[in-house]
Amino acid sequence: MAKLTVLPTTDANTKNAAFMERYARRVGATPPGMCPVAVQLSLLQSAQMQTCGKCVPCRDGLPQLAKMLEQVLYCAADESALESIRVMATMVRDTSDCAIGWEAANAVLEGLDTFADEYKAHVTTHFCQESVGQSVPCETLCPAHVDVPGYIALAGEGDFAGAIRLIRKDNPFPTACALVCEHPCEERCRRALIDAPVNIRGIKKYAVDSLAADKVSVPSRLPDTGRRIAVIGGGPSGMTCAYFLALMGHAVTVFEGRKKLGGMMRYGIPAYRFPRERLDEDIRAILSVGNIDVRYETQVDAALMGEIAAEYDAVYVAIGAQGGKSLRLEGVDAEGVSSAVDLLSRIGDGDWTPDFTGKNVVVIGGGNVAMDCCRTSVRAGAESVTCVYRRRVEDMTALRMEIESAMQEGVEMLTLQSPVSIEVDESGHCAAVITQPQMISAVKRGRPAPKDADKPQQRIPADVVLLAVGQAIESAPFEEFGMKADRTYFCADEHLQAEGFQNVFVGGDCFTGPATVIRAIGAGKVAARNIDEYLGYHHTLDCGAKAPAAKPNDRTPYGRVEILERPANERKHDFAGVETSMSTEEAVQECGRCLRCDHYGCGITEGGRIQYA
């Protein structure tokens, strides 16, 4: 019998694992603006190094593909080379023995189609497209393009007023984004090359917790222009647009259908995540600009919209997506069944809280709204809260932290269960949700799709059923006025100009579909700039702050400081804010981790296209 040998822990495989972790970090920190052809070549070269050498297509084909792609990257190929690459990649994909060759060649084929314009630019103009060019990752990936390194540096120096002013240069909701932003700015943070992304949202929260936003003066308005703009909807997008237009000297009238401003920030996000008094800090600061008139509890119908469009120089429609979608289920109209959006909306004014004492609550959905309803139901005294979702936990669109927090508070995640009907008792009240077990299947549209599993249906007792399955806009009055909508969202061009109208603009959730607060803010900022240009102006604004000089980078690895929540057993009994603040010591350390990409590296260049030949 042959003797076996235990490999030492210092063998090449173990050492490679450490280097591969570094490689994974580099891939994760790939900066925005990279040339797609260069990215594809780097992936192909990695795959080339992984080949075992047994099958010819993978062993010999991938190096040949890499050489051909390299010629395209350096603009040394003509258009015929693209077809040659396609032929070679197809052959390698279809004849490779294992997934290494198949996946590498398939990625090349997908890239030829996905980045067709970039490939064409390399072989015809011998330039990358104008959009190619590295930029500061956090600023680029923020939908409002906030100067993140700048306000982090100011916060690190204790200049909270300066940090808030610099945030307001692009985003008038510093407090809102400090508490509820999904922080896309962190996705490609270059600090990940060393340890982990900077906790950007946490630093912003530290700044607004240290100095309330409404205690920091806003910039002075520019001289009045005599132009009047109407904003339909007082949510994050509408109020952002109103803020910048008012600063530019235009007179703004906001038509708000509810009692208070804030939109889904007030009527869709529970107070434990975003205390109303903190939202009011941002609102008060925005209104302090002046020249913003708010008409509350004004429902805009087709007739009023016609009057507004005729009376005002420009109109920005930002009504959000505040209607809840339903499901086609037997029993869905039973008493006790309601839209999650409607529930959160009723709570928004602050004068009503549901009483679910002793009740079994079932929430259907897997997004942030579903988690908000689950955690709200816990605080409303529910005996049990069950989240029913037809995919897996890892497929949920809700933030990981929200899912984990809900589970800590006692919410049961019942996944791979698809609702098929709602059982109704003799009095017409819901009694249970009947589900069909699912199994995860092939990937469709980027996510593994579920399908019915060969298992018996389940019965989940339910006194209350909340449907958190999507949001829709109430477009009927605006369509009656003449605005066009594709299914449920308004149609507009790339400048947010409504199809068929010169002076009507749209933006936010009613244009893109339900998204995030920061995306709505970014849309409002763009709309304000485009409306200003439409009116014949090109105003520039001074925020009253600038980033301090960059200090030498500290590249010592540190652990990332996280924002903590109050203990679950404490927080689940009230609607007070759940998050705690960073200490000064923690914040200074976290601010010091920023590598100031606005100064070092790509930040010191003017950008521009890359020319290889």
Image (spheres, helix red, strand yellow):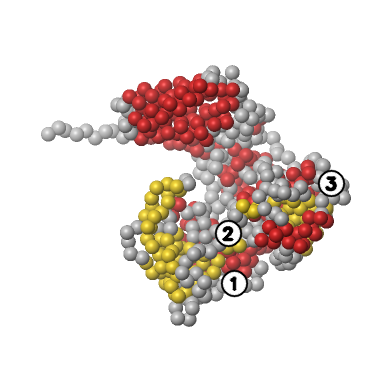
Q: Residues within 10 Å of mark 2 (few under 14, many from 20)?
A: many
Gap in Å between the C-alphas at discs 1 and 3? 43 Å
Residue 420 lies left or right of residue 491; in this view the side is: left
- The crowd level at tag 1 (other Cα within 10 Å; few <14, some 14-19, many 20+) is some
**What residue would you read off at disc 3?**
222
Distance between the alpha carbons at the discs numbered 2 and 3? 38 Å
Q: Are marks 1 and 3 in contact (CB under 8 Å)?
A: no
Residue depicted at x 45% and y 75% = 424
Q: Nearer the viewer, residue 354 or 327?
A: 327
**Residue indicated by mark 2:** 471
Marks counted in the figure total 3
- For the point 82% across and 51% down, the residue is 313
- In terms of sequence position, does the residue under pointer 1 or pointer 3 come before the other? 3
Residue 270 spot, x, y in % from top left: 59, 63
Specify the amino acid type for callout 3.
Answer: Leu
Q: Residue at x 61, y 62 (%)?
A: 323
N-term mark: 2 or 1: 1
Q: Which residue is mark 1?
A: 353
